[in-house]
Image (cartoon, rainbow, N blue to C red):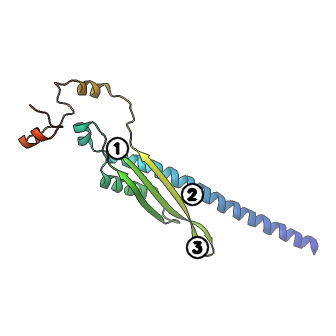
């Protein structure tokens, strides 16, 4: 009887250890998956939201906030598996010039203590930057004062006089 109970105890403890290892690894891999998902989706959404007309007019990168949020939510929804998690997404510190975002994503896990769900909180901050350091074609065109490339076109007289960005003809 003593050896039988010892065998049952060892089997019970090994099952508990396997369950605990499975839960901890699920929690840890969920954290990694959420972080890389938020990182990749945020960087892609920043690239989608860059305003090309503003860049050609001023030479500065500008991100449209609404387009960023829309692109982020669409890309995030396409890439998550909603079978076992609920996500709460918060956008903090959206800046248009320079393009910068701070995002916080909470996701529920299978863990619960005292009847409360454990959440994985992922926070990510990003600043949009150019992938290439210098474009020789654009630089040469912008350096030429006679070239109208990159200069705003103003067709109303009131803007020509008051706006320093408008080229005076």
**Circle nearer the viewer, 1 or 2:** 1
**Circle nearer the viewer, 1 or 3:** 1
In this view, the residue in front, 12 or 27, is 27
Q: Residue at x 88, y 70 (%)?
A: 6
- From mark 1 to mark 3, how far is it between C-alphas? 40 Å
In this view, the residue in front, 4 or 128, is 128
Which of marks 3 and 2 precedes in the sequence? 2
Asked where in the image residue 153 lies, by quadrant, the reply is top left
Which residue matches tag 2? 30
Percent position (x, y) of residue 89? 43, 61
Which residue matches tag 3? 116
- Which residue is most to the front? 162
- From mark 1 to mark 2, how far is it between C-alphas? 31 Å
Q: Which mark is residue 28?
A: none
Asked where in the image residue 155 lies, by quadrant, the reply is top left
- From mark 2 to mark 3, how far is it between C-alphas? 18 Å
Percent position (x, y) of residue 30? 57, 57
Residue 158 vertical placement versus 90 (above, below): above
The kind of secondary structure element at disc 3 is strand
Q: Residue at x 27, y 36 (%)?
A: 59
For label 2, the crowd category at 10 Å Cα-Cα, with few meaning under 14, some 14 to 19 and many 20 or more, is some
Q: Residue at x 29, y 39 (%)?
A: 60
Which of marks 3 and 1 precedes in the sequence? 1
Q: Residue at x 79, y 69 (%)?
A: 12
Which residue matches tag 1? 98
For label 1, the crowd category at 10 Å Cα-Cα, with few meaning under 14, some 14 to 19 and many 20 or more, is some
In this view, the residue in front, 168 or 74, is 168
64 sits to left or right of 21: left
Q: Quadrant of the N terminus?
A: bottom right
């Amino acid at each position: 009887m003593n050896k039988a109970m010892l065998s049952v105890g060892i089997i019970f403890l090994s099952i508990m250890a396997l369950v605990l290892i499975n839960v901890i690894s699920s929690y840890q891999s969920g954290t990694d998956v959420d972080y890389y998902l938020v990182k990749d989706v945020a960087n892609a959404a920043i690239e989608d939201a860059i305003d090309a007309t503003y860049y050609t007019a001023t030479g500065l990168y500008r991100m449209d906030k609404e387009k960023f949020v829309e692109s982020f939510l669409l890309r995030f929804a396409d890439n998550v598996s909603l079978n076992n998690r609920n996500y709460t997404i918060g956008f903090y510190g959206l800046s248009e010039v320079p393009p910068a975002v701070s995002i916080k994503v909470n996701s529920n896990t299978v863990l619960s203590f005292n009847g409360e769900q454990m959440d994985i909180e992922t926070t990510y901050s990003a600043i949009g930057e150019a992938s290439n350091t210098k474009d020789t074609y654009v630089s040469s065109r912008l350096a030429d004062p006679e070239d109208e490339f990159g200069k705003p076109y103003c067709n109303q007289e009131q803007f020509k006089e008051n706006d320093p960005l408008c080229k005076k003809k």
